[in-house]
Image (cartoon, grey):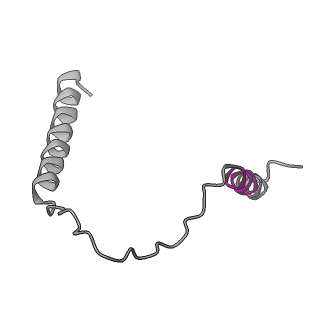
Amino acid sequence: MNKKKALAAVAAVMMVMKTKEEEAEYSAPEIKEPEPKAAVIAQPMVRPLNIWGISGRQDHMQANSMMQLRMFK
């Protein structure tokens, strides 16, 4: 492909992405500050991020995909 055509295509894609971002920014609803209440409502507990658990799950998924691709003999 011609370099000028490739540059024009990339510029066009970047321009479309920029206009979509601007459109989303202007159309986003304004977030108002919540009014303080007399009683504080209890928030549910959020579990901390378990890095070791995520890593182990990724290892299992990778091993399964390697078995499906028959990499082990």
**Viewer-proximal residue, 20 or 50?**
50
Answer with left or right where residue 70 lies relative to residue 39. right
Compared with residue 60, is residue 10 higher up or lower down, i.e. above or below?
above
Magenta residue span: 52-60
Residue 51 in picture, x, y percent from top left:
66, 49
Q: Residue at x 73, y 54 (%)?
A: 69
Please tell me how many numbered marks the rendered image carries: 0
Q: Answer with left or right where residue 34 lies relative to residue 65.
A: left
Does residue 54 show up magenta in the picture?
Answer: yes
Residue that protrudes farthest toward the front in the picture:
38
The magenta stretch spans residue 30: no
Identify the residue at image location x=23%, y=24%: 2
* Residue 17 drawn above or below residue 28: above
Classify the position of the N terminus by image quarter: top left
Q: Is residue 37 above or below residue 22?
A: below
In the image, residue 59 sits, relative to residue 6, either above or below, namely: below
Does residue 69 appear to the left or right of 49 in the view shown? Answer: right
Percent position of residue 50, x then y: 66, 54
Give the residue displayed 12% in from the left and 46% down from the top: 19
Q: Residue furthest top?
A: 3
Main SS, magenta residues: helix
Residue 48, given in percent of the width and then of the height, sits at 60, 57
Identify which residue is drawn at 77% across, 53% down.
63
51 or 59, which is in the foreground?
A: 51
Looking at this view, name the residue that lies furthest to the right.
Answer: 73
Return the x and y of residue 37 as percentages of the image width and height.
28, 74
